[in-house]
């Protein structure tokens, strides 16, 4: 085992560069902002080049840090080659695998192409990036990786079967690497975001539900960054933690899956033939 020196500040542990995927809006834009606030330079990755540039300009202006932007479709197979010209010369100490495609509609109303693309963005891209940057972090005996998961990782969640499957993948790979890479000084976190007010959340047009409290991005991201290095995974928001605890302890798995299915129908249904 390598001797691991204890870095104290956030930037000593995870600097000098963070790479955040899906940084053009929503939770990813907020991860980029809070990394900058904590003193890290940031590589912002997403497909929308214009939005990335304006986010990056904001961070440079408000926090005096450096940025790079990479407009890249993370469903591609060659993402490491595409990133290399920008990231090979940078020491990336924090990777936030945030980019994700979320859709709520019956499984068979998606084409197979849509489902594969979702699988590649939500799971394969994060796997490739964690393998690439994780190896460098282990050599440095420091660093951090966050995988965006979701409460849907914990039980079958109707009308987002493939999405929930990718989030379960992210949770388990994160918790496993928390142990494996943690032995080499690298912190890993599976972040199960609860319902959070973002463009992605709004696009699914949820109706209010008495048990669902929609969080703001600032609080959710601060919880994730504060939990990194302290535990393998976290659910954002006290009410979400309580809700999943009760469901996990008080309901059978069958009961929990049925309850979630009915809640999804109330919040996102009714589903038409074309949804
Ligand atoms: N909001 C919630 O309630 C919630 C709950 C649980 C988990 N999460 C997870 O949190 C993460 C962020 O969610 P969000 O609500 O902030 O979503 P969002 O508002 O839809 O933002 C998604 C981000 O991912 C990027 N992205 C999408 N497809 C991409 C692709 N093919 N290549 C590169 N970038 C791509 C988007 O940028 P471009 O359009 O510019 O490519 C955008 O920056 C996701 O992994 C989501 O599953 C969210």
Image (spheres, rainbow, N blue to C red):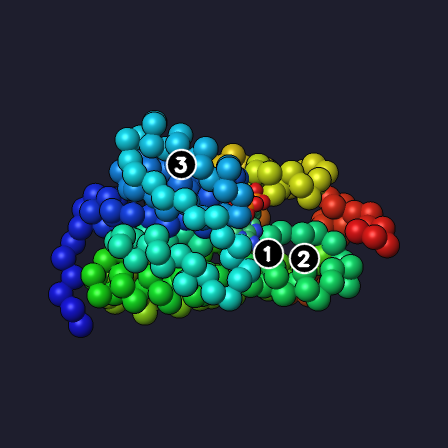
Dots 1, 2 in contact, CB < 8 A: yes
Tell me the CA gap for discs 1 and 3. 31 Å
**Number of disc labels:** 3
Q: Is mark 1 within 8 Å of ligand 1?
A: yes
Residue located at (62% from left, 42% from top)? 201
Residue located at (61% from left, 59% from top)? 118
Measured from the top left, where is residue 57 in percent x and y? 39, 32
> Crowdedness of circle 2 by 10 Å Cα count: few (<14), some, many (20+)?
some
Toward the right, the furthest residue is 273
Q: Nearer the viewer, mark 1 or mark 2?
A: 2
Measured from the top left, where is residue 107 in percent x and y? 74, 62
Label placed on residue 135: none
Measured from the top left, where is residue 64 in percent x and y? 28, 31
Q: Tag 2 or tag 1, which sits nearer the N-term? A: 1
Which picture quadrant has residue 143? bottom left
> Crowdedness of circle 3 by 10 Å Cα count: few (<14), some, many (20+)?
many
Label placed on residue 160: 2
Residue located at (60% from left, 38% from top)? 199
Residue located at (74% from left, 54% from top)? 105
Q: Nearer the viewer, mark 1 or mark 3?
A: 3
Dots 1, 3 in contact, CB < 8 A: no
User: Which residue lies under the disc numbered 1?
Assistant: 152
């Amino acid at each position: 085992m390598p001797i691991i020196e204890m870095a104290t500040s956030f930037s000593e542990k995870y600097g000098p560069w963070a790479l955040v995927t899906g940084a053009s809006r929503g939770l990813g834009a907020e991860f980029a902002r809070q990394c900058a606030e904590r003193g890290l330079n940031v590589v912002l990755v997403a497909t929308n080049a214009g939005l990335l540039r304006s986010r990056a300009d904001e961070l440079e202006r408000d926090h005096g840090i450096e940025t790079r932007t990479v407009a890249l479709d993370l469903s591609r197979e060659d993402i490491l080659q595409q990133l290399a010209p920008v990231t090979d010369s940078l020491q990336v100490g924090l990777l936030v695998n945030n980019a994700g495609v979320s859709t709520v509609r019956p499984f068979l109303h998606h084409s197979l192409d849509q489902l594969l693309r979702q699988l590649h963005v939500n799971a394969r891209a994060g796997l490739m990036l964690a393998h690439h940057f994780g190896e460098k972090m282990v050599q440095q005996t420091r660093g951090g990786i966050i995988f965006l998961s979701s409460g849907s990782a914990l039980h079958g969640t109707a009308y987002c079967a493939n999405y929930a499957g990718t989030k379960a993948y992210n949770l388990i790979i994160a918790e496993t690497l928390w142990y494996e890479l943690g032995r080499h000084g690298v912190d890993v976190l599976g972040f199960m975001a609860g319902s959070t007010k973002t463009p992605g959340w709004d696009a699914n047009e949820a109706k209010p539900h008495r048990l669902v409290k929609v969080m703001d991005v600032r609080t959710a991201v601060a919880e994730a960054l504060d939990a990194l290095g302290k535990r393998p995974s976290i659910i954002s928001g006290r009410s979400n933690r309580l809700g999943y605890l009760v469901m996990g302890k008080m309901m059978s798995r069958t009961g929990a899956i049925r309850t979630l299915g009915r809640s999804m129908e109330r919040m996102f249904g009714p589903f038409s033939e074309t949804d």
